[in-house]
């Protein structure tokens, strides 16, 4: 799924990042994802670190079908080989995943490549490495990474200004704080617990999408 830069920006508007650990026992993971996409999420990242490769591939294949039914890109976090095996639309990798590897060459020219960057230098290097977008933060801390520190809005803006590809904000974002990102240069918001830890993930996604549409 090759996207233009403008299409990529639009796809980052409300970027849902999965984490099944937040769900209640009575919630079906696939059904929850379907409701989140139906409610306005514009991109899905499968981030299930507790699954082995075989289970991740099976799940990614199933979620890819759900995403396709909504016209939403589906990418896999970190595990490039699993993303390729599942025929996902792309992959998102961190700085450690780049060491000694040309991720763009591995996935080819047509899949989406997102790279985490927390400094201007990392952002420029990510763009040079063929990234379609950059994820940066944690803008408001993080409930999924306990060692994540808040990134000042001014620092986020410097990163966004340093590259020509879109940048998505991540880290502790919810309906109560998203307005604080106004004017920071983000293309959109990536949300984990603000969607999947909510009582009603579909409603949370709908509210966040409405707020994101006002901001970006």
Image: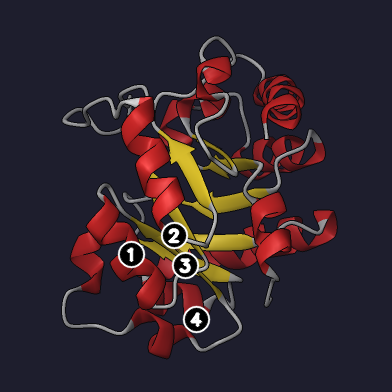
Residue underneath mark 1: 124
What's the CA distance linking mark 3 and mark 4? 12 Å
Residue underneath mark 2: 163
What's the CA distance linking mark 3 and mark 2? 20 Å
* Label 3 vs 2, first from the N-terminus: 3
The residue shown at (48%, 73%) is 83
Residue 136 shows in the view: yes
Q: Are marks 3 and 1 in contact (CB under 8 Å)?
A: no
* Badge number at residue 91: 3
Give left or right: position of 143 versus 14.
left
User: What is the secondary structure assignment of the residue under circle 3?
Assistant: strand
Q: Residues within 10 Å of mark 4 (few under 14, many from 20)?
A: some
User: What is the secondary structure assignment of the residue under circle 1?
Assistant: helix
Q: Give coordinates of residue 214: x percent, y percent.
A: 74, 25
Q: Nearer the viewer, mark 3 or mark 4?
A: 3
* Label 1 vs 2, first from the N-terminus: 1
Residue underneath mark 4: 85
Q: Is residue 95 above or below residue 148?
A: below
User: What is the secondary structure assignment of the residue under circle 4?
Assistant: helix
* Label 3 vs 4, first from the N-terminus: 4
* Label 3 vs 1, first from the N-terminus: 3
Q: Nearer the viewer, residue 73 or 2?
A: 2
What's the CA distance linking mark 1 and mark 2? 6 Å
Give left or right: position of 174 versus 204.
left
- The C terminus sits in image quarter: top right
Q: Nearer the viewer, mark 1 or mark 4?
A: 1
* Label 2 vs 4, first from the N-terminus: 4
Give left or right: position of 1 versus 39.
left
What's the CA distance linking mark 2 and mark 4? 31 Å
């Amino acid at each position: 799924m090759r996207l233009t830069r403008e299409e990529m920006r639009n796809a980052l508007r409300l970027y849902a990042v999965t984490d099944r650990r937040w769900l209640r026992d009575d919630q079906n993971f696939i059904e929850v994802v379907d409701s989140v996409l139906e409610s306005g999420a514009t991109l899905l990242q499968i981030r299930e670190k507790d699954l082995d490769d075989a289970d991740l591939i099976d799940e990614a294949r199933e979620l890819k079908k759900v995403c396709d039914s909504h016209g939403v890109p589906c990418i896999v976090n970190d595990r490039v080989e699993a993303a390729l095996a599942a025929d996902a639309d792309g992959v998102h990798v961190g700085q450690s995943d780049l060491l000694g590897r040309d991720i763009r060459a591995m996935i080819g020219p047509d899949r989406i490549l997102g790279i985490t960057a927390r400094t201007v230098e990392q952002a420029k290097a990510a763009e040079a490495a063929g990234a379609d977008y950059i994820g940066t933060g944690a803008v408001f801390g993080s409930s999924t990474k306990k060692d994540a520190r808040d990134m000042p809005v001014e620092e986020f803006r410097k990163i966004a200004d340093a590259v020509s590809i879109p940048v998505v904000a991540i880290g502790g974002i919810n309906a109560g704080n998203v307005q604080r990102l106004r004017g920071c240069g983000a293309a959109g918001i990536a949300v984990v617990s603000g969607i999947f830890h909510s009582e009603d993930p579909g409603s949370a996604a709908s509210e966040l999408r409405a707020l994101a549409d006002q901001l970006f």
